[in-house]
Structures are given as C-alpha cells and as structure tokens.
Amino acid sequence: MRLVSGFIAAVLPLGPFVVYLTDSSYSPALVIFLMAVTGLLAAYGLAASSRAGAAGLFSMIISSLLLMFGTGYIPYLAGFSLGSVSATGLVWLGISIAGSVYAYFLGNAYHSVTRLSRTLKRMNYEEHDIAELGKLNSSMIAVGAGLLAISVLAYEVIAYVRLTLLKNSLLALVVFLGGYAFIMIAVRRRAQGARQLDAVRVNER
Amino acid sequence: MINMVREVVRSYSLLLAVPIFFITVAALSAEKIMVIPAIFSAFMVGFAVYADSDVEIASDFALNKERISTDGLCSGVLSLKAKGGFGVITVAVPPASYVEGDKALKYKEGLELEKGKASRVFFKGLNDLNARFTVDVKALKRGTYDFGLVTYTYHGLFGGRVIERHDDKGIRLTVLPKYKVVQRGVWRISPSSVTPRVTPNRLGPYSTDFVAVKEYAPGDPYRFINWKATARSASGQLMVNEFEREGLRNVIFLVDVGRSMRLGFSQENPLELSIPLILSLSKVLLRYGYNVGLWTSPPTGVSVMPSSGQSQFQKVLDATLEVSYWGERGIDLEDAKVLRRVISETRPLLVILTNLAVLDDGRALKATICANRMETHCRLLSRALLIDVVHDSIIIKRELAAEFPDLKLLNAGITRKSTYELLPQGIKVVTWDPVSERVGGVMARVMPLVRWYA
C-alpha cells in the first residue's frame, strides 16, 4: 500500500498541467516545462523518500499562480494575461489542484511511513508488524479520497444554493477564514477534551 | 479561546497557510472553482492537526505467575487502549522492554520468549484502539527480574509527533534455581555432640575448654576479662579469655563470583551449577541441625548470617537469587569486615565454591580467607573445604553433543594438581566435574568431609 500512496503522490501533481495543456490557451512550452519540473520533483521524491510531497506542493502553488495570472483581478489591473482556461477545463482544474493538495499530504505520509518502516526493520520487527503500516497508508488514502469527495460535494452545494454572500469574493474570503478558524479550534478542542476526560477517569480510579 | 488559537497558529503556521493561499487565489482570480482546493486543504489541515494531537494510551499488564523455577513458563497479558491521534503505536512488554540499558544482558541470558511476541505494532486509526496480546516467557536463569515495564511509542501519521512513554507496573518475576532434595545418603552427618536440632542461637554456651587470650571485643562477656593479662598488656588493651563454645556446627558457603566462574555458557557455567549444589547441601545441613550461612568472594553485599531452621533455607534461597558475577557489582568492604567478624566469632567450616581455572582468580579468594593477607604464608581464618567446579567438560560436552549424543565424559581435562599445590595449607579440595558427576554424587563426597571438618 505504501507504493500505491507513493504512486498517487507522484502522478496527481501532473493533473493541473494536463488540464492547462488540453483545455487552455496557455503557452504549451511553459506548461510542459513546469510539468517536467514537477515530474522530476516527483521522481526524486520517490527515489529519495525524503521530499515525496514536494511535487504536490510545487504543482498546487504553480498551477494556482498560473490561474491567478491568467484571469481575475491581477490581469485586469496589470493589463496582460498568461492565458485562459475553458469553462469545462476550470472544473477539472479545480479538482486537479485539489488532487495536488492530496498528493502533497500523501507524499508527506509516504515519507513518514517509509522512515518508520526502516526503523521497524532495523529493530527486527516482523513482516506482520510492518504490515500495520500498510493499514496506515490505506486509511490515509481513504480519508483523503473521502475528504476530496466531501469538498467537491460542498462546492456543488454552494454552487446550487447560490448564496448572495458568496457573490462578493472578498466577503467570501472573510466567511471562509471564519469557518476555517472554527474548524481548527473544534479539532483542537476535541483532542484536548479527550485528554481531560481521560485525566478525570484516572483521578476517579 | 485566544490561547488555543495562538497554540494552533504557532504549531501549524505553514500548514495553515495552505487553505488561506487557495482562498486568496479564489478571491483574486474570481474563480469560485478554487473553493474546492480551499475546502479540501482546510479539511486536510484539520485532519493533520487531529493526527498530530496527543494520543492517550492506557494499558494493563499482568503475569499469571510471579514465582517460577528455571525452565518454567509464565504468561504475560497486555491490554492496550488508545484514544486520539492517527498513526502507529509500537508496544514492548518484558523481556523486550528491558533490551536497552545496563540490565540488557541479564534479561537476554535469563529469559527466553517461548510463544508470542514481546514487541508489537498497532495501527491507530480514527476509532479507539483496543488491543490485547499474550507472551509466554521461559526462564533460563535464576534471579529476580523487574517485569512490569511496558513501553509505548506513538508515531503520528505525518511524522510530526513521536511520543515515547514508559509505564512501570511494579511487577517482579522471581526465578528460583532448581535444586535436588537429597532425602537419604550414604553419609552419616549428625553432629558428634548432643545438641538441640533447631535453635535460633548461632552458638551454644561457653564451655570450660580454654582456647587463648585475646583482645576484648564488644560482645565478649565481662566475666571472661583476664585482669592479669590486661595489666601486662603493653598497649593497655583489655584482654579476655577465649573458651570453646558448645552448640551447633557452622557452615558458611563462600561463593566465588569472579571471572572464572562464568567460563562456559550463560546458563551453564560453574557459578550457575554451584547454586543448586549449595541449596541441596544447605537443605541437608539444615535438616541435620547445622547453622548455614552464605557469602560471596569477594563480598558483594549478598550474605546470609549463619543460622538454622527451615526459615534459614528460605533466606539462603533468596540470597542465591541475588548472586551474580563480580563484574556487575562493586566490592562491599563493610560486608568483608562483617564476614571476618562472623568467621572469628563462630569459627565455621568455610565451604568455598570456585573454579581454579587460572591461578590469578584465587587471589581474591585468598584475600578473603587469609587472616594475614599474605601471598606466601596464608593463615586461614577458619577451616576450609574447597569445591573446585571445573568448566572444561561443560564446553567440550556442548561442542561434541551434536556429533556424539551418547558421549559420557569421565573427568576429562582435570589436571589441576599443580594449582592445588599453590593453595594455602589446610584447605581440603574436592574437584567437581558437573558434566560427569551429578549433585548427589558430589554430595556423597562432600558430606563426610563436612562432618569431619565441622
């Protein structure tokens, strides 16, 4: 399963560039060059097992910047545009950039699991024990895929409801940041709440 | 609330920037499709924060037996519960939890896994973890082992958090040495004088048989003060008459814990083979009403004052659990003084168990049993019987066992006469080859000598 997550972490970062090549007016030479750099980063990450998430990180940043310099406020103010993406291509671009994010996290997990696997082998753990790391990988893949599906679903809900609030992009930014902070605090609180609950149980004993 | 936000921001500043970057891109590019990576990255960061949170691990470890004999088995059961976090937990229970540190060799040599694994790896997913496993451990060597240490290491998914904890349950495993209880022998060993069989006193009352005049020592009766000798004493020391004491015979086992006693194999060497012999001899001697004591040479703090009765056997047994090689302990000088005093007070028969493989190994022994501590002319503190436990055939037997399973060695390689000649005069030597002669055999040779000397 570790190899599967490594493979996904290497392949997904190429997705946004494929969309730019097929469904956009961006310079193919530029896109191919960036794609090659991403590919090299992915190959190096897999071989060295140290920077497997780098390709995902590079891909998500560069493909977002390409979009930002192709459409929206910056081309409007600067008076030039790198290119444009078709309406169909935009949907796939959004999903493929999310895929790069997924690749970034999977790559980090791949690196962590590879290191742990080496440590366990050095400590003479048996294959049965090392197989537990496979469960960790498969769970990570499943959780990531589930969250990606939920994200797409959430986008569809937002698009369907057509909230007035979201028509203003700056206001949407503020709403997102508020919601984001709320998620982080809720996650942190849950972890802390579990600790406090256990501490109470220990005291009761 | 503000503190919590600060904590989150401080710990995950780079990661938190990812969703903000996407939502900024969404705002600047005016493309709402970028909401997908923004939401997804927010979820993933939330997941990473959750995976990196503290994991709560609770465990319960229990042994089915805390007292077994060598070659005996005991089972340990570990129940493990874990909450929070997302990663893997490595767990080690005894003996694997003691593989590092200064006790590692003791556990490696003394205990063996018979069934199961003492180190395990568990995946901790989103659900709470409830795991349980059993290990069967075989005891190879006598001793007292701390057996309650459970170690956990939690490795978070993204490698950001490694939590290592040690939980000592305070369990101790006692591995008793196996010894032979000899019920009847060919020897006659009842003490020649008529004395009570069991008494808490080390010695009986003073007789009228004069021994010598000596310097007063605390504990000497005032009525034995020799005033004339005191007046004649140049140093002004108080002098007392010393008389023979009636009562029980005393035997002190003096076990050499030097390097030569370790020659052979970890579970089969002169020291390990001496322990069952000491216990078998103690059992018989105590049954016949002797006072039995135990010391190590050099003194290492493990000692049993000579006394009689069945409770004394338990004391000797407990002390043998602590007897280990000299290299692992320091010399207890205070204990050496106590031993000398006990010898001078009780005048016991010293039964010395050693392996005279190298002459140098006898030096420490000499320093303990010679009153004048001189290399050449040693005046023994007391009568002594030396049991020389030879190691040669232990090694030969194991090496040849595979090729010649029915091989019987007849005192092979025992040519130590020249070494014995260098020993202080007055020591009776009994050579014991544990491979070719069983404990019962050597006891049949030793017991008449004990009777004679004690």
Image (cartoon, coloured by chain):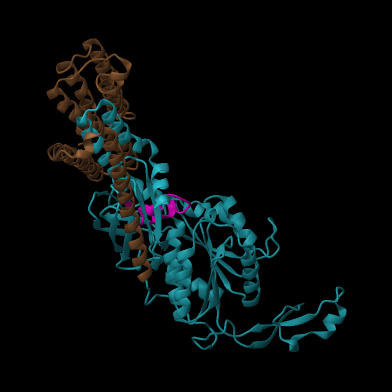
Chain colours: A brown, B cyan
Q: Position of residue A197 (x, y in %)?
A: 33, 62
* Position of A18 relative to B278 (above/below): above
User: What residue is at 44 percent from the left and 75 percent from the top?
Assistant: B314
Image quarter hosting the C terminus of chain B = bottom right
The percent position of residue A17, horizontal first and vertical second, equals 21, 20
The residue at the point 46 percent across, 70 percent down is B318
Residue B376 appears anywhere in the view: yes
Q: Is residue B277 above or below residue B51?
A: below
Q: Is residue B314 left or right of residue A47?
A: right
A155 in the magenta segment: no
Residue B99 falls inside the magenta stretch: yes
Front-most of residues B219 and A32: A32
Closest to the observer: B347 or A127?
Answer: A127
* Front-most of residues B289 and B410: B289
Q: Which residues are magenta?
A: B91-110
Question: Residue sitting at 29 percent across and 56 percent down?
Answer: B82
Query: Where is residue B145, by image quadrant?
Result: bottom left
In this view of the protein, which residue sits in the foreground, B66 or B24? B24
User: Percent x, y for residue B143?
Assistant: 43, 63
Residue A141 shows up from this direction: no
In the drawing, does residue A68 fall left or right of residue B265? left
Q: Quadrant of residue A59?
A: top left
Left or right: B142 with respect to A97? Answer: right
Q: Which residue: 54% across, 53% down? A: B327
